Amino acid sequence: MRDTDLKNTRMTGWYKLPRRDRVSGLAGFLNIPGKDFSDILDSGGLDVDTADRLIENVAGVYSLPFAVAPNFLINGRDILVPMVTEEPSVVAAASNAARMIREGGGFNVSLTDPIMICQIQLIPSTPPEIAGEEFRRTAMTILSRKDEILAAAADVDPALKQAGGGPVDLEVREILNEKSGPEFLVVHLLVDVRDAMGANAVNTMGERIAPILEEISGFRAGLKVLSNLADKRTVRVEVSIPVSALEMKDYPGERVRDGIVSASRFAELDPYRAATHNKGIMNGVDAVIIAAGNDWRAVEAGAHAFAARGGRYMPLCTWRKDDDGALKGRLEMPMAVGTIGGAVKVHPAARLSLQIMGATGAGDLACVAASAGMANNLAALRALATEGIQRGHMKMHARSRIN
Ligand code: MEV
């Protein structure tokens, strides 16, 4: 393929090309010198000296396949999606589903502000059983001094303030023990972390304001750390797919659509199924998060805690039949990711990934990761609701077998 052959990310038969041609096509499409691609990716994306600076006790580096999924149209933009995974068929499934979603106008993605929560635990000296009234009074006193507390937290990170972020609010929660008595208070410091994942910024702020909270409350500060249940930093994806795009050999589009809706209901009603349904979503999400050098454990923890927030473990993505007969999908999940700081700063392949997907900030990365998650969910349900997952899966496994 010549460089100029790629005009948008809708690609046919791209997977059949030799790897070199795929890379040169990509380089041309993205206007990145082909040599930059090879220098970074041919050796696994990370040299041992950089790795040695990243974590402790380094003995070497460990590589995983780095792929690029075509066909994604996200908020009207053609996006190539970098994916790092060891699992065959994840990239093919994402590309295939993105092609179907494209036929319905692509992924419509919206985001909340990037608000992270830092928790500061406040432990009373009085035994909990006699502290009830004191808890309420203390919570009110803390809230009455909100401005002073937020100002102290803001002082920690002037650069964040300059970028338009910083502490935005304070909440106080009573944590109840099994007998429904209050056991301790928890202050939530809400921080707009802009393009950072935010763990370092909010943890430092929590440690800075803890002595002030101790002084105000007379309680002792316990833990001060971010919550990975980042439910104030969520991404929402909506798609509508015409039935014609869902058709398979031996399966009319209507039947595929109804099978996907029924599979969604199964996950909504049964946590055993919801866990697997969400695992399929995380196949896509994690692959993008890892490619972008981000903390995928944080995203995983947030996803599953969010899925269980109502008291029962639920699917992160659901599917319905639209009034006009199309298949309508909706996904919502926390997405605590960053495009500055951490490994992103030093990992060459992570920086290349952001360049490939055209991410200029954390919001772009969140949109791409969530879209990949939805694509993988659609592909899995479509296969499960028709010919079964093993046919396609085994084809890919056979391809990857090392003789
Ligand atoms: C396998 O990695 C993921 C699936 O099990 C997801 C699902 O069942 O929805 C195929």
Image: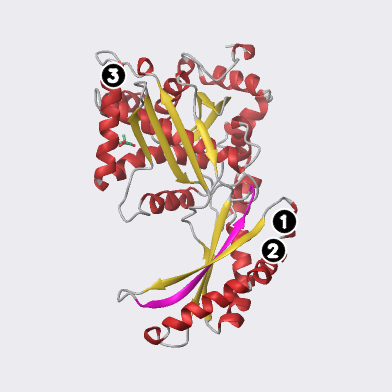
**Is 318 included in the stretch rendered in magenta?**
no
Depth-wise, is mark 3 or mark 2 nearer the camera?
3
> Is residue 33 rendered to the left or right of residue 109?
right
Q: CA distance from mark 3 to mark 1?
A: 52 Å
SS label for mark 2: helix
| Residue drawn at 42 percent across, 34 percent down | 374
Q: Is residue 21 visible?
A: yes
Three-letter amino acid code at the position of disc 1:
Lys
- Which of the two discs, 3 and 2, labels the residue nearer the N terminus? 2
Residue labelled with disc 2 = 154
Q: Residue 161 bears which disc, if any?
A: 1
**Quarter of the figure with residue 270:** top left
Frontmost residue, 257 versus 305 = 257
Q: CA distance from mark 3 to mark 2?
A: 54 Å
Frontmost residue, 278 versus 50 = 278
| Residue drawn at 30 percent across, 43 percent down | 274
Residue labelled with disc 3 = 254
Three-letter amino acid code at the position of disc 3:
Glu
Disc 1 vs disc 2: Cβ atoms closer than 8 Å? Answer: yes
Coloring scheme of the render? Answer: secondary structure
* Main secondary-structure element of the magenta-colored stretch: strand
